[in-house]
Image (cartoon, rainbow, N blue to C red):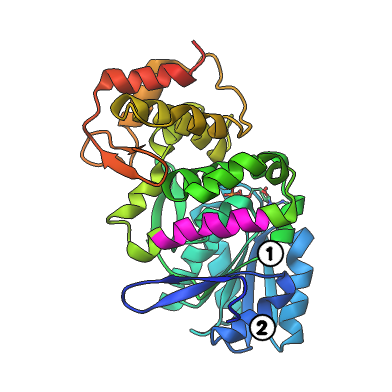
């Protein structure tokens, strides 16, 4: 793999995979470089993304001798269901795939999670290539090997850790991303800056205007740094036993907001942006020296709709307590001492959590 814009996830076991920022037209070459050899390849996408980008992907694959087939599913979170997983199984197995037939997940986090889980389970595992097309997927969900689908009782409750062979992100695909999707992804970018990279934080503070209009050079540098934060964390913690928890900064609050608004009002990253404001407020309570104003100023630049006025404190507190992924009843928070120094704590007084909520809720 060329060294120019390529980063690597590397596990202590020695295994790992490249994360390359390259044009879609370089997909076939990049697949070759990780040892995948032409044959059948199933490209899973959603209809929006397929309309925009299936053709160049199909072309690069065909030109290198692959026999691609594109499966375009409906867009949106409601596609992360057993029914659509079944649709992938049907397309793959009735067509005829073997253990070496890769699945290319072309799309945002929804397609990455769903097609990734299909790859993890088809024939007990076929090669997976992530081609993320949303900001959120490029800096976050396509890195780290989480795959899965939703269940009626909660999100992402059925899934597996399954590492891809390659992640190829084309920055140019971000040009067509709807505004709110961009904003949603920018929350995870800011999160990565706060938990892991002072220089990224400074860059965002200085260049937010250019980043917000998706200036390509600014975006390239921001994404390289934001990905490196996640890569460093997941490389140390393949299966979420330790430092991966830091990636949940803002998420204890954010998930509760998403649940309380029934996943309708706020995009994931918008909820996380608001959640980070609450988490910073709580962080200052326990770390009075935190440069709170500077941190809050950056987080506040992420556009998010207002929380509906009828969302009450009691509701979000309850939503926090019933988060399916909460461990053993005690609320766990990721707080920061300063930029790059996150920590996990379950020693937080309920009154302080409530104060943090009041800070962001419309009261
Ligand atoms: P996320 O990555 O935030 O989990 P999704 O996978 O749900 O998001 O994608 C968000 C929406 O954006 C979907 O409607 C999807 O079809 C659309 N989308 C994804 N990538 C692009 C793109 N590069 N250009 C335009 N629309 C896109
Ligand atoms: Zn998130």
Q: Residue furthest top?
A: 363
Left or right of residue 351, residue 46 in this image: right
> What percent of the width, then of the height, locates residue 285?
32, 24
> Quadrant location of the N terminus?
bottom right
Instruction: Identify the mark at residue 239; answer none if there is no mark.
Output: none
Between residues 70 and 295, which one lies in front from this camera angle?
295
Q: CB under 8 Å between callouts 2 and 1?
A: no
Q: Is residue 226 magenta?
A: yes
Residue 296 drawn above or below residue 37: above
Q: In which image quadrant can residue 286 be found? A: top left
Q: Is residue 251 shown to the viewer in this render?
A: yes
Between residues 128 and 87, which one lies in front from this camera angle?
128
Q: In which image quadrant can residue 339 be found? A: top left
Residue hosting label 1:
170
> What percent of the width, then of the height, locates residue 355?
36, 17
Left or right of residue 230, residue 60 in this image: right
Choose the circle earlier in sequence order: 2 or 1: 2
Residue density around tag 1, few if under 14, some if 14–19, many if 20 or more, within 10 Å: many
Between residues 260 and 30, which one lies in front from this camera angle?
30
Left or right of residue 133, residue 99 in this image: left
Residue hosting label 2:
29
Q: Secondary structure at mark 2?
A: helix
> What percent of the width, then of the height, locates residue 361?
48, 18
* Residue displayed at 41% across by 30% down: 280
For label 1, being within 8 Å of ligand 1 is answered: no
Q: Is residue 97 magenta?
A: no
* Residue displayed at 35% across by 53% down: 244
> What percent of the width, then of the height, locates residue 30?
62, 80
Residue density around tag 2, few if under 14, some if 14–19, many if 20 or more, within 10 Å: some
Between residues 69 and 139, which one lies in front from this camera angle?
139
* Residue displayed at 46% across by 49% down: 150
- Highlighted magenta segment, given as a residue range: 219-232
């Amino acid at each position: 793999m060329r060294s120019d814009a390529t980063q690597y996830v590397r596990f202590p076991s020695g295994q790992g995979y490249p994360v390359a920022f390259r044009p879609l037209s370089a997909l076939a070459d990049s697949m070759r470089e990780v040892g995948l050899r032409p044959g059948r390849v199933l490209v899973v996408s959603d209809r929006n993304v397929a309309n925009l980008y299936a053709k160049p992907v199909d072309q690069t694959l065909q030109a290198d001798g692959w026999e691609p087939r594109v499966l375009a599913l409906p867009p949106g979170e409601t596609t992360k269901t057993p029914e659509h997983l079944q649709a992938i199984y049907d397309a793959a197995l009735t067509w005829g795939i073997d253990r070496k037939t890769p699945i290319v997940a072309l799309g945002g986090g929804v397609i990455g999670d769903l097609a990734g889980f299909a790859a993890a389970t088809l024939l007990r595992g076929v090669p997976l290539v992530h081609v993320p097309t949303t900001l959120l997927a490029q800096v976050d969900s396509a890195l780290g090997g989480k795959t899965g689908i939703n269940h009626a009782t909660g999100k992402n409750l059925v899934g597996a850790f399954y590492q891809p062979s390659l992640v190829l992100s084309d920055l140019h695909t971000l040009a067509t991303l709807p505004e709110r999707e961009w904003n949603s992804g920018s929350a995870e970018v800011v999160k990565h800056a706060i938990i892991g990279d002072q220089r990224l934080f400074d860059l965002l503070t200085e260049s937010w205007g250019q980043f917000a209009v998706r200036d390509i050079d600014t975006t390239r540098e921001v994404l390289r740094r934001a990905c490196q934060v996640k890569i460093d964390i997941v490389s140390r913690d393949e299966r979420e036993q330790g430092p991966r928890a830091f990636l949940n900064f803002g998420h204890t609050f954010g998930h509760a907001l998403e649940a309380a608004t029934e996943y309708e009002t706020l995009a994931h990253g918008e909820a996380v942006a608001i959640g980070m404001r609450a988490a910073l407020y709580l962080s200052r309570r326990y770390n009075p020296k935190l440069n709170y104003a500077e941190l809050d100023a950056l987080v506040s630049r992420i556009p998010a709709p207002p929380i509906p006025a009828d969302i009450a404190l009691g509701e979000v507190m309850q939503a926090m307590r019933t988060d399916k992924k909460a461990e053993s009843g005690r609320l766990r928070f990721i707080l920061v001492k300063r930029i790059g120094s996150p920590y996990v704590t379950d020693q937080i007084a309920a009154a302080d959590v409530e104060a943090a909520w009041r800070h962001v809720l419309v009261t």
